Image (tube, rainbow, N blue to C red):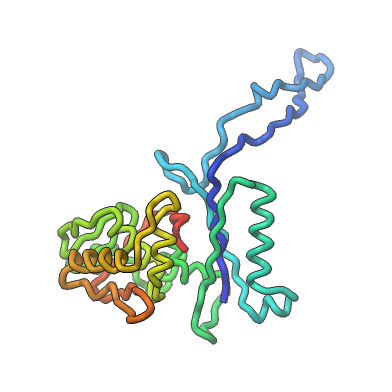
């Protein structure tokens, strides 16, 4: 069992810039130390690596690989690690919001903990590396010219090459399930995650209505969204389902 902590700052503060000494040499004159004005040293903040033009960084994900046994050997627990990271985040950036989730894997699965976490949380770079290691480097469209293409990067769903015509909330619902593939999500989690605090929270029956409409638009592929009686809903990937993700992981991923 391992964990990931996502942090999304809601406000930015400009870094403090101290005037560093600058050495100047002029026509054999002695070296003089000049303090450059802060305004001259100030420059636009560097862009975060891998963030394309036209987008902005809204937070980050820190993958932490450690199972419960290793945590116990270190004299701690996963919960204590999460709380320590949250306290540090609050100290460094009080305006930041945090969300932590535990990545689960079958007992005895093996592999490096951090790699297991990245794969469990659908990190695009880790998924690409896994496909390459398995010798599968074809594009999704080559694998599934017909079938379901869930294009998270473009916020669209194609059924046999035709747009499914999902509403914004229907796509959000499907995306939430897809990014947590194989895990049953209860209705309360869907309400808490997909509706803002300022919105009027829907009832559990409203969630059922949204799911029913979503499944209707998925037509003969509707069974990729499973109803787990008494528990909630789950996304089950079929052989004819392809998922495309953006090159930069979304901070919403778990």
35 vs 104: above or below? above
Q: Residue at x 58, y 49 (%)?
A: 96
Q: Residue at x 61, y 77 (%)?
A: 67
11 vs 203: above or below? above
Instruction: Evaluate whether residue 221 shows in this view.
Output: yes
- Judging depth in this view, the residue of 131 and 200 nearest the camera is 200
Instruction: Evaluate whether residue 131 shows in this view.
Output: no
Count of numbered circles on the image = 0
Is residue 193 shown left or right of residue 151? right
Name, please, the residue furthest toward the right: 30
- Judging depth in this view, the residue of 4 and 209 nearest the camera is 209
Where is residue 250 shown, x and y percent of the image?
Answer: 44, 55
Is residue 99 shown left or right of residue 206? right
Is residue 3 shown left or right of residue 73? left
User: To which quarter of the image does residue 209 belong?
Assistant: bottom left
Where is residue 173 shown, x and y percent of the image?
Answer: 33, 62
Is residue 62 shown left or right of residue 179? right
């Amino acid at each position: 069992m391992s964990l990931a902590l996502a942090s999304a700052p809601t406000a930015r503060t400009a870094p403090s810039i101290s005037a560093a000494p600058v050495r100047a040499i002029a026509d054999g004159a002695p070296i003089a130390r000049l303090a450059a004005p802060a305004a001259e040293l100030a420059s636009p903040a560097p862009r975060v690596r891998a963030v394309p033009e036209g987008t902005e960084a809204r937070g980050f994900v820190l993958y932490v690989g450690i199972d419960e046994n290793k945590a116990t050997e270190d004299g701690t627990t996963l919960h204590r690690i999460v709380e320590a990271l949250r306290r540090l985040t609050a100290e460094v950036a009080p305006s930041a919001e945090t969300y932590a989730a535990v990545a689960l894997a079958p007992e005895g699965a093996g592999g490096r903990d951090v790699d297991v976490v990245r794969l469990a949380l659908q990190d695009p770079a880790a998924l690409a590396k896994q496909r390459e290691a398995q010798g599968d480097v074809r594009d999704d469209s080559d694998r599934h010219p017909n079938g379901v293409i869930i294009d998270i990067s473009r916020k669209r769903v194609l059924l046999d090459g035709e747009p499914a015509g999902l509403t914004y909330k229907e796509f959000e619902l499907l995306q939430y399930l897809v990014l947590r593939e194989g895990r049953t999500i209860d209705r309360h989690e869907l309400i808490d995650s997909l509706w803002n605090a300022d919105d009027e929270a829907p009832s559990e029956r409203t969630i059922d209505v949204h799911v029913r409409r979503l499944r209707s638009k998925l037509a003969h592929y509707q069974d990729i969204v499973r109803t787990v009686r008494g528990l909630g809903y789950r996304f089950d990937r079929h052989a004819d389902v392809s998922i495309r993700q953006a090159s930069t992981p979304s901070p919403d991923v778990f």
